[in-house]
Image (spheres, rainbow, N blue to C red):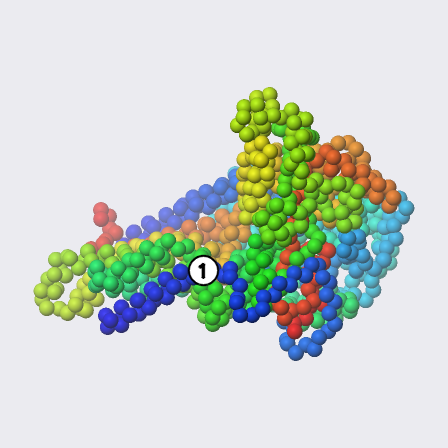
Amino acid sequence: MKNFILRRLFLAIPMAIAVSLISFSLLYFSPGNPAEIILEQKSPDSSPDENAIKEYEKKLGLDKPFYDLYVIWLSKALTGDFGVSLQNGEPVIDEFMARFPYTVMIMVGATTVYFVLGVVMGILSALNKDGIIDNIVRAYASLKMAIPSFWLALLLIWVFSVKLKIISAFGYNGLDSLILPSFALGLGMAGSLARVLRTCILEVMSSDYVLTARAKGLSNKVVVLKHVLKNAFLPVITLMGMKTAYLLGGAVIIESIFGWPGIGSYFIDIINAKDYPAVSGLVFIFGILFVLVNLIVDISYAILDPRVRYDKGV
Amino acid sequence: MKRIGALLLCGLLVFTVAMCGCTSDTAPETTAQPQTDTNTNTNTNTQTQSQTKPQILTLGAYEDLKGFEGKSLVFDTLMKYNEDFSPKANIIESWEVSGDKKTYTLHIKKGIKFTNGKEVNADVVKFSIEYWAPYRYCKYTKYLDTIEKVDDYTLKLKFKESYAPLLEELPRIYLTLPETVDDKGNIKEWIGTGPFILKEYQKDQKAVLVRNDDYWNKAEMPKIEKVIWKVIPDENARIMALKSGEIDAIGITEHYLSVPAQRIPELQKTPGLKVMIADKGTVETYSFNYKKGPLTDKKVRQAVAYAIDREGISKNLFNGIPQPTGHLLLPEFKNGPKNAKPYSYNPEKARQLLAEAGYKDTDGDGILDKDGKPLKLALVTGDRQMERDTAVYIQKNLKDLGIDVEIASLESKARKERAKKGDFDICRCHPWVAPPVRYLKWRCTDDGYDNYGCKFGVNDRVKELINIIYTGNDEEIKNAWNELWNIEYDFCPATGVYVRPRAFVFKDNVEGFRFDADVGYIDLSNVVIK
């Protein structure tokens, strides 16, 4: 296990470099000039001429070829210096640290919503196979997957903030302002989690050891909680790990709608501005984070299922 | 236990499905009297009301305070604009201009201080004139020879050659201390002389500004004590925040262009809200590629200009809100096209011009052709709904005449790339701005392509006229502008369609809003909360 963990951690850096190179290249070769874009942002009712753009390019250090720009950026990034944002001159790492906690809050909130709802619905659905509850849960899962999170977000705002006026929807004003964004992002995912868990529970319940447990006279509650759930949960853990990337993508839109000062809305700004250092820096950091998240998922697997081992040959 | 779980689940699902079945808010309230107050550029100088309500104004904004409009609350500009965009005094209280327009003597108002106590003097004004020009696209630095400090409150600007537009550019220059800005046009410390002081700032969340009780301009001292600038990037969410009462106004912070025209009728009918729509603004303009393709023929360009049903676009697409116009700039602005005749919808004239240009439908397919080539145009526009809808309507108008149009609706950067390469026949372009002298050196110096299509330097005479506008006396400048507009309208390198609707929406207990001529300037001097 130790070797496995070290191997995965070791691979995180080249993976992060690879994704940062891809994002840097895509941004560099896409239409638009960052110097021109940033100058236009400073004065939207005019446009800079060619000379002004060239001078600003020099100031921003963008008058170098692609290879030089990336190598300079990478050599600093590997020492923890992700450079400064072209837009405002602030260090990229400072921007990340200021915003990431807000995104984490939404992601944790959404994960809590979808986990709790998904697990409850999945268990009830499996234990009432083909019954009313099962049908309702399956219908809900299909319906929720068809409804985009941004539309649900606007609906929640309209109901709870505009009509009922019981909750403030915009910006961060304490933990209660986390409720609507968490539900907007988490409700859709709860449906898919419920379906997966239902399938897993039904599969496990038809296993020999479960039949044996029942034959031994153990109550349904003990059979389900002690034997079935532990094994049915393994694919759920994998799903939750995969959903982390989805959560981040969903958080971008949710942050924009709720005026949440997270990393998602910042990503949109810097991509639109072709802010290479900021985008590549954030992609690099997230690359490493995703490797860590997947590592945690894999370790959880090994903890939950003693059969899973990451030694050589397994 | 199972029953309770089932009941809870049913309740949750019914609630969720009920929410999913709800429509979004398009229907007006039925109980209260609808407010359909469409004030047009009303400068409501209300007397101070009995102000029992805390004077705290919350603005919903697309972006952070530290963008474009936010600066106007904290920083003064050296001069300001009148309604017709002629310059007026501000920090620079008076000036003299030499007859040859090579020397400007600027007199700075005494007794103005920054909020950190530092005094406004000639050194600070000189720094601001030199620093902000590249970031505000003012051309004067290219022609400036020296800035001489005559005394603590007087500067003399000497130009290498005559430079007429200086006074129309100085209203774009912020007054800032050297130590509060970096070398890339970013403000590091928000210390200004303006009507508000930045008290609290949370990046991309909100900013709190309090009234500057020592503001030097007592005539424009705000009644509002505190402004909260709340960032809500999504436009639908901003509208809902206004309806929920969380914010007091939207649209002001994005030079009045962020309220979609399609939602204005609904907002006008919403109880508790008022909508203000400006009666002046820039014109939605389309550039013609007169350098290659079918539109190299002037008759074809003019035919396209006559073929566009501007009234129809305004009425059928946008509820009559944008004012239709074939002008490139509204004549009311200083140096606007007062004597030029705008293009208007005239399909018969358009057909006649196309026939004169040699286009006929020889094969009966409904599309005109000439020398065996069908008349097909590529129309490049942006990806906003209003832009797409307008393009589709124009496509229909031209199709009725026998012109086949293919629309490319592109994101901003991609659209600019295509325009720069000349890969278009018709392209949505940047409108003429006010004062129009700013547009000359930017888009009229030659006939090349730029981010917005073909430039307006259609012939050598235009270049001569620009020179006269920059160096001539008032009479010569006036005549030069008249001639320039006549050339542009006759040559038809572009055409206007409608005045871009500038609107903002606010709660009906707030009074005193007005549009400033400078759309980037937020004027809260008369705003009160009743």
Q: B102 and B489: which one is in front? A: B489
Number of residue marks: 1
Q: B462 and A65: which one is in front? A: B462
Q: Chain of mark 1?
A: B
In the rendered view, would you say A294 is above or below A119?
Answer: above
> Residue B186's x, y, as percent?
65, 54
* Residue shown at 28% from the left, 65% from the top: A120
Quadrant position of residue B192: bottom right
In the rendered structure, the answer to whether residue A293 lies left or right of residue B423 reads left
Q: Secondary structure at mark 1?
A: loop
Quarter of the image where the N terminus of chain A is located: bottom left
* Residue shown at 47% from the left, 64% from the top: A157
> Residue A96's x, y, as percent?
50, 57
Q: Amino acid at mark 1?
A: Thr
In the rendered view, would you say A258 is above or below B141?
Answer: below
> Residue B176's x, y, as percent?
72, 59
* Residue shown at 80% from the left, 38% from the top: B483
Residue identifier under label 1: B23
> Residue A112's x, y, as percent?
36, 64
Quadrant position of residue B494: top right
Residue B133 appears in the picture as rendered: yes
Q: B210 and A19: which one is in front? A: B210
* Residue shown at 79% from the left, 33% from the top: B461
Q: B216 and B297: which one is in front? A: B297
In the rendered view, would you say B468 is above or below B332?
Answer: above
Residue B210 appears in the picture as rendered: no
